[in-house]
Amino acid sequence: MNTHNTHSPVSAINTQELFGQLQETVNFLHQAFETGRGAHEVEEELWRRMLELGRCAYGSWLEVFGSGDAGETLVGVDGRTLKRLEPLRRREYQSVFGPFELERAVYGTREGQAIEAVPLDARLNLPQCKTSYLLQDWEQRLTVEVPFATVSATLDRILGFPRSVYTLERNQQDMAQSAAAFWEAKPLPPPEEEGAILVCTADGKGVPMRRKKAPNKPPLPASSAHGLTDKPPEQAPAPSMVGKDLHPSGPRPGTKKMALLGSVYTINPVIRTPEEVLEALCSPAPSVRDTKRPKPCHKHVRAALERDGDDTTASQVATIFNWIAEQAQARNPSADKPIV
């Protein structure tokens, strides 16, 4: 997209195109009513039009900032004077409304050296990768639940463009690098919002591992391919020899690695009479379901799937249990809460 205008006012937003699309949408609704179109058809067409309108509006908003040109020189964060480098540098930006191309002014000491400042990227708070923060968030919420290929198909169905499996995998790996810093920066819950009991739990969760592809076998000679060979056929291994370690593609399908999940929260006690306790223990189903049970307060859940050089789980055990200990100390500094 064109972002050469450096000081475009907000009035430069293409309102004519935006209002034109809105009018077309109103005309579509009138036509849909007159022709008796079904609700699902109108809903789907409106969604498609809203995506187009959003793309137009978002693109017009990006145009307002131009290239981010701050002049021939720029004072860096360390006080050094940086020069504007020519030409404008282009970057791709993938939003939920589709892809955009931004042409930005960049600054450094001289050509051939590292770019040290990009005012437009800083002004818009753009991520280092191509994918917008919102789209990253949606992708992450999906990829923790379903396979990458399913995420790609789902986004294509909803937003109108697919995401490659490689891109989804790489984005998740990049975001995972910030997990430790995220937990360190996470503020503690206000003490007045905490419960009377501190609960610390840890449990293992099997995570299915994708098998590695079997190596490509070299093609057989023509004589062998037609059965014209004097070499006797190789004997299959005895049944007792066939096991997980001899699987041609590595571990058998369904092999899992154990992840470790830790959770820390506080909760208030459930005050019950002896009769209620007896009923809960002995009755097949409580006569009256208690809907006033206290809920966990500020439940924090952290998971780790790590292996050390010897392929043991020692590193993830240290990560999770050290985190649980730190949370318990921080959320119960006076040690006056019972710990469960």
Image (cartoon, rainbow, N blue to C red):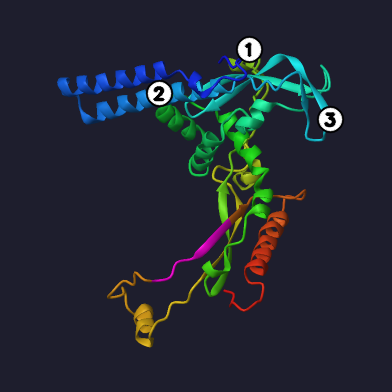
Q: State the residue position of label 1.
A: 222
Location of residue 144 in the rendering, given as x and y in whole percent from the top left corner? 52, 44
Q: As shown in the figure, which amino acid type bears the numbered disc 2?
A: Leu
Q: CA distance from mark 3 to mark 2?
A: 43 Å
Identity of the amino acid at label 1?
A: Ala
Q: Residues within 10 Å of mark 3 (few under 14, many from 20)?
A: few
Q: Which mark is residue 53?
A: 2
Q: Nearer the viewer, residue 288 or 129?
A: 129
Q: Earlier in the sequence, mark 1 or mark 2?
A: 2
Amino acid beneath label 3: Arg
Alpha carbon separation for disc pair 1 and 2? 61 Å
Q: Is residue 283 left or right of residue 221?
A: left
Instruction: Look at the picture and state if 173 lies above or below 266.
Output: above
> For the residue carrying disc 2, how many other residues have a C-alpha within 10 Å: few (<14), some (14-19), or many (20+)?
many
- Image height check: is 92 above or below 77? above
**Where's residue 3, x and y in %?**
59, 17
Say whether residue 42 is left or right of residue 65: left
The residue at which mark 3 appears reads as 80
Give the camera-side residue of 215 and 301.
Answer: 301
Secondary element under disc 1, as helix, strand or loop, is helix
Q: Which residues are magenta?
A: 293-301
